[in-house]
Amino acid sequence: MLAINNLQAAIGEKEILKGISLTVNPGEVHAIMGPNGSGKSTLSAVLAGRDTYEVTGGQVTFNDKDLLELPPEDRAREGIFLAFQYPVEIPGVSTTNFLRTAVNEKRKYRGEAPLDAVQFLKLMKQKMDLVKIDQSLLSRSLNEGFSGGEKKRNEIFQMAMLEPSLAILDETDSGLDIDALRLVAGGVNQLRSKDNAFIVITHYQRLLEYIVPDFVHVLYNGRFVKSGGKELALELEERGYDWIKEEADALI
Ligand code: ADP
Ligand code: MG
Ligand code: MG
């Protein structure tokens, strides 16, 4: 589904990603962990197509298309969803209206007929039950005045509605409280299937107690320096990141 090959990216003169390679297949959950400043958010932003970053080398294909050639909105329509680190607020636009437009734009892009009002409401109802979100949240302006937990709930709902084939969850490093954590994890676990994949980015192991990954990769100083199974996350929790840094620095 996703193949990243030797990806390099910079902000201005500063090189941030220094050769990242990663393959993600349908049905897989990959966790990306690593110390602060290692480039985790940069990687997710580059995949989503944020223009702050300049790709300076490497290739990324998504469903056999050259992802880096696609504008951000087409990446979303192809089925990539980036959640969390900076949820946008859109005053005057309710979640319902925002999603109706987004869902139908995606359908149009894929050559599918738009959903009419009845079909759309039916889909909303189904997904609301799935991720347990309240109707009142959906009629308010998108993210405006939402609490942290409400924003998360809303993003999970957006993810459910857009049915991405690849969802990238970039957690804030400030840490979520346990309720927000369970909510995010519960939503992801509901949506996990053999046809979609998740990249879960997190500084801490805690989230991975709830979303159990198939693979764990450690990003440090713009490179993946270690990969393993879910047990690697536990080892990091126990031993911290210093030993990883020492191992990696010794190789450079
Ligand atoms: P992480 O998400 O792993 O904490 P980031 O991707 O946010 O790491 O940051 C990686 C590096 O890039 C850090 O050294 C950070 O200071 C730098 N960086 C991130 N955004 C910018 C920016 N807009 N301008 C300059 N440097 C940046
Ligand atoms: Mg950070
Ligand atoms: Mg980050």
Image (spheres, grey):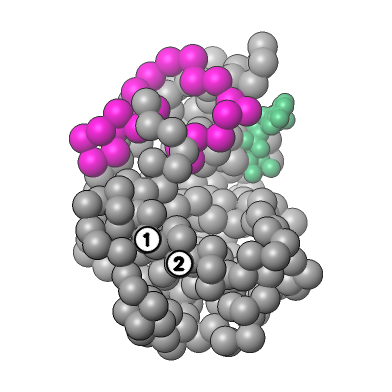
Tell me, yes or no, whether the two marked residues, 1 and 2, touch with CB atoms within 8 Å. Answer: yes
Classify 17 as above or below 206: above
Classify 127 as above or below 4: below
Label 1 environment density (alpha carbons within 10 Å; few <14, some 14–19, many ≥20):
some
Identity of the residue furthest to the top in this view = 13
Q: Residue at x 39, y 41 (%)?
A: 74
Q: Quadrant of ligand 2?
A: top right
Q: Residue at x 70, y 58 (%)?
A: 89
Q: Quadrant of the C terminus?
A: top right
Q: Residue type at mark 2?
A: Arg
Q: Position of residue 187 (x, y in %)?
A: 46, 74
Q: Which mark is residue 128?
A: none
Front residue (pair 234, 157)? 157
Q: Which mark is residue 100?
A: 2
Q: Quadrant of the N terminus?
A: top left
Q: Is residue 30 visible?
A: no
Q: Residue at x 63, y 28 (%)?
A: 52
- Say left or right for 161 vs 201: left
Front residue (pair 192, 206)? 192
Residue that numbered label 1 is attached to: 104
Judge whether residue 73 is colored magenta: no
Quarter holding residue 115: bottom left
Label 2 environment density (alpha carbons within 10 Å; few <14, some 14–19, many ≥20):
many
Q: Position of residue 120 (x, y in %)?
A: 38, 76
User: In the structure shown, which secondary structural element does the residue marked by tag 1 occupy?
Assistant: helix
**Residue range (magenta):** 47-68
Classify 50 as above or below 33: above
Q: Residue type at mark 1?
A: Asn
Front residue (pair 241, 124)? 124
